[in-house]
């Protein structure tokens, strides 16, 4: 594993670098090729933060932990990274039918198809309140709804968030 260790407001000792590298080597079992790891030891006021970011064929996995001792933080971050790697591998293997961490990705090997506009839709914007727009969003079953807000006469968007709630986008003029 290619490991880049950075200290921010903290001088990282050789012993800490060795232990970090040793423990991160345990993650090699998840990868065919050598991933890149960026480890940041940060000291801020009264707390220490350890941030580890793994980059493997364009996929990023990141974990952070905050505490009083960097040696303990390494043991906190490793299970987080392992869980994320397993989660990503399972998700990509299951849903997209590819081995996301087992195959090397090639960029630019195939011909890229130019994106083209395939559909244009026109509709009249009727003034309505945010509550009415949310009702329209639910009735239509879309993930977003563009509308003209009745009081301010601005174009706004209500959208369905991943957690099931509704968000509102209001442009600044």
Image (tube, helix red, strand yellow):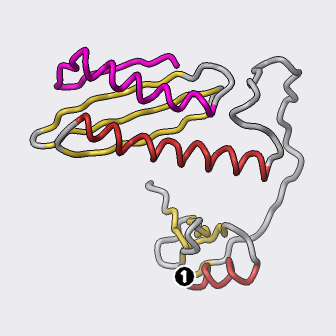
Callout 1: SS = loop
Q: Is residue 107 magenta?
A: no
Q: Quadrant for residue 108, please give it.
A: top right
Q: How many marks?
A: 1
- Tell me where the magenta segment starts and ends, as one range: 1-30
Residue shown at 61% from the left, 46% from the top? 86
As rendered, which of 124 and 42 lies closer to the eye?
Answer: 42
Residue beneath label 1, please? 129
Residue extending farthest left: 46
Instruction: Tell me: residue 6, above or below residue 116.
Output: above
Relative to 167, residue 95 above or below: above
Q: Position of residue 52 (x, y in %)?
A: 41, 33
Residue 154 screen position, x and y as percent = 53, 66
Q: Is residue 119 above or below residue 7?
A: below
Quadrant location, the C terminus: bottom left
- Please report the residue visible at 60 percent of the width from the left and 80 percent of the height from the top: 134
Residue drawn at x 87%, y 29% as measured from the top left: 113
The residue at the point 41 percent across, 23 percent down is 22
Between 90 and 29, the one lying in front of the other is 29
């Amino acid at each position: 594993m290619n490991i880049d260790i950075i200290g921010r407001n903290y001088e990282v000792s050789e012993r800490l670098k060795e232990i970090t590298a040793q423990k991160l080597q345990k993650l090699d079992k998840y990868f065919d090729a050598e991933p890149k790891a960026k480890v940041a030891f940060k000291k801020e006021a009264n707390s220490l933060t350890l941030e580890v970011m793994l980059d493997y064929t364009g996929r990023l996995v990141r974990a952070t932990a905050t505490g009083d001792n960097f040696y303990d933080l390494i043991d906190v971050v490793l299970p987080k990274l392992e869980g994320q790697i397993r989660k990503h591998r399972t998700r990509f293997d299951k849903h997209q039918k590819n081995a996301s961490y087992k195959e090397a990705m090639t960029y630019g090997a195939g011909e890229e198809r130019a994106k083209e506009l395939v559909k244009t839709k026109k509709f009249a914007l009727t003034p309505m309140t945010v509550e009415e727009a949310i009702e329209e969003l639910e009735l239509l079953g879309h993930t977003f709804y563009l509308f003209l807000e009745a009081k301010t006469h601005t174009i706004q968007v209500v959208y369905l968030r991943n957690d099931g709630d509704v968000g509102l986008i209001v442009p600044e003029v």
